[in-house]
Amino acid sequence: MATITCTRFTEEYQLFEELGKGAFSVVRRCVKVLAGQEYAAKIINTKKLSARDHQKLEREARICRLLKLADFGLAIEVEGEQQAWFGFAGTPGYLSPEVLRKDPYGKPVDLWACGVILYILLVGYPPFWDEDQHRLYQQIKAGAYDFPSPEWDTVTPEAKDLINKMLTINPSKRITAAEALKHPWISHRSTVASCMHRQETVDCLKKFNARRKLKGAILTTMLATRNFSGGKSGGNKKNDGVKESSESTNTTIEDEDTKVRKQEIIKVTEQLIEAISNGDFESYTKMCDPGMTAFEPEALGNLVEGLDFHRFYFENLWSRNSKPVHTTILNPHIHLMGDESACIAYIRITQYLDAGGIPRTAQSEETRVWHRRDGKWQIVHFHRSGAPSVLPH
């Protein structure tokens, strides 16, 4: 009796060299005969599997069929060699220098990100890393990375060369995707790439991911604790002037330096609002980055960049308003983002006299992002919600 063999796969695909090997499977490069497209085929010897392993395999196959590419909210589609400023699209540690410089960018940003990923895959930690995002961005813009011992001692020179070409600061000199595929470390893998099992890298990757998860858990717990504490104690505080929320929580989780820095953010926010209330555009501009962005009701849902939009209100409204204005900031929440950046969110109550001399009150919810340059705090972005009004800005 002849043995019947399913030939559907071998009729459609041609198998080539081995790409990887595990306890139960082998991954080999394959090419679809009609289209010439290359794929990776995972081949499993089912004879080695127990009944329970078969169940796991079926479950994995179901999961693979459900997998989808996602998170395209952070992605930008670029056509051809188009170069433009699309905003900060991406994850901080993988952003390229041209994105951080706000230069027009295109496909080379993906090669930079691939270089970061390759670096991580080889040793288990990223080329650029700092708890302070501002310092992280400075590292990236300077291309400040290296290949420290002992982790990189066993990595081939060809792998390091490919990373160097991917992490080239100048995008016009950065290796392209087509060139990367022809690089010896990829095209001559069997003779150039190291075949050693990098267990230390696997261990480092686990630690790196564990640190990120731990940091996220700590930040989430701190935020939840602050909000809970602020909700319980909010009714016992008088709303006169600026007051720090969640005081008891801050005492237990923050050191004195952090408290001082938060008070500094509150103070500069007060000074900014005072300049607005006084119609003092000169003082206002000194506290704002020239490229400041803003979302506010007066802009009708549009993102405003620069100071010209705000200048109109200073020159045509506030400079002519001689009536007293009193502003109160309620429940400020400050998030420090390293030594040079901070975000403050609060409720702003503005009391003023209308044209008929009748006292009025306006409320807005505001978030302002501060960044320190040359020792001076400046607003780089703010978001204000609430009904459009003639006074708050």
Image (cartoon, rainbow, N blue to C red):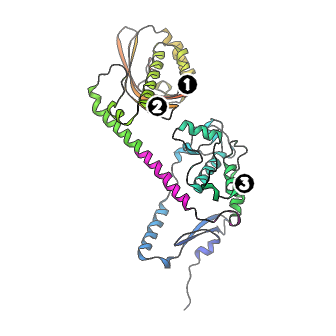
Q: Residue at x 69, y 43 (%)?
A: 171
Please check the rendered image and state whether residue 359 is part of the magenta-colored stretch, yes or no.
no
Q: Does 85 sit above or below residue 272?
A: below
- 256 and 121: which is toward the camera: 256
Type of amino acid under label 1: Gly
Q: Nearer the viewer, mark 2 or mark 1?
A: 1
Which quadrant of the view contains residue 39? bottom right
Q: Residue at x 46, y 26 (%)?
A: 297
- 318 and 147: which is toward the camera: 147
Q: Residue furthest bottom?
A: 1
Secondary structure of the residue carrying tag 2 is: strand
Rendered image: mark on residue 375? 1
Range drawn in magenta? 190-217
Tell me which numbered mark, 1 or 3, is placed earlier along the sequence: 3
Residue density around tag 2, few if under 14, some if 14–19, many if 20 or more, within 10 Å: some
Q: Does 141 sit above or below residue 214?
A: above
The count of marks equals 3
Residue density around tag 3, few if under 14, some if 14–19, many if 20 or more, within 10 Å: few
List x then y, in percent, for residue 41. 58, 68
* Cα gap from disc 1 to disc 3, whole angstroms: 44 Å
Q: Quadrant of the N terminus?
A: bottom right
Please check the rendered image and state whether residue 204 is part of the magenta-colored stretch, yes or no.
yes
- The reply to whether dot 1 and dot 3 touch (C-beta < 8 Å) is no
Tell me which numbered mark, 3 or 2, is placed earlier along the sequence: 3
Rendered image: mark on residue 343? 2
* Cα gap from disc 3 to disc 2, whole angstroms: 42 Å
List x then y, in percent, for residue 44. 53, 73
- Mark 3, residue position: 179
